[in-house]
Amino acid sequence: MNRQRAEEIAASPVMASVTFNNMKVYIQHVNENGETARIYDLSDPKNELDVSLDELNEVYQ
């Protein structure tokens, strides 16, 4: 996923369908380095991760 789209999703009040390793995730924010984002698995919100934007995929419905 590109940085601009990840930032748009993180800022939007509408929940986008995003996956990381086939898990549905929520993007909390894009980190200052612009290459990673803070996410969490929707089924386990306490388990936060910093992942590369390249590993995030938007699923279009």
Image (cartoon, rainbow, N blue to C red):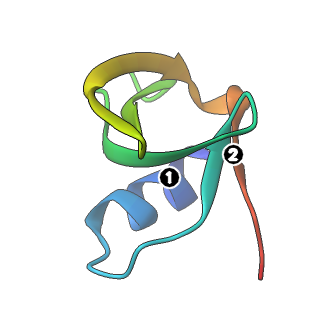
Image quarter of the C terminus? bottom right
Image coordinates of residue 42 in percent, x first then y, are 41, 46
Nearer to us in this view, 24 or 49: 24
Sequence order check: which comes first, mark 1 or mark 2? 2
Distance from Cα at disc 1 to Cα at disc 2: 7 Å
Position of residue 28 in the picture relative to residue 60 (left or right): left
Tag 1: amino acid = Ala
Residue on which disc 1 sits: 6
Image quarter of the N terminus? top right
The relative height of residue 49 versus residue 19 in the rendered view (above or below) is above
Position of residue 13 in the picture relative to residue 52 (left or right): left
Q: Residue furthest front?
A: 43
Task: Find residue 14 and report its image quarter.
Answer: bottom left
| Residue at the image position 70 percent from the left and 28 percent from the top | 55
Nearer to us in this view, 29 or 35: 29
Tags 1 and 2 touching, CB below 8 Å: yes
The relative height of residue 24 versus residue 20 in the rendered view (above or below) is below
Label 1 residue SS: helix
The relative height of residue 40 versus residue 25 in the rendered view (above or below) is above
Residue on which disc 2 sits: 1
The relative height of residue 58 versus residue 55 in the rendered view (above or below) is below
Tag 2: amino acid = Met
Nearer to us in this view, 37 or 25: 25
Crowd rating for badge 1 (residues with CA inside 10 Å; few <14, some 14–19, many 20+):
many
Image coordinates of residue 36 in percent, x first then y, are 47, 23
Label 2 residue SS: loop
| Residue at the image position 43 percent from the left and 64 percent from the top | 9
Image coordinates of residue 24 in percent, x first then y, are 58, 48
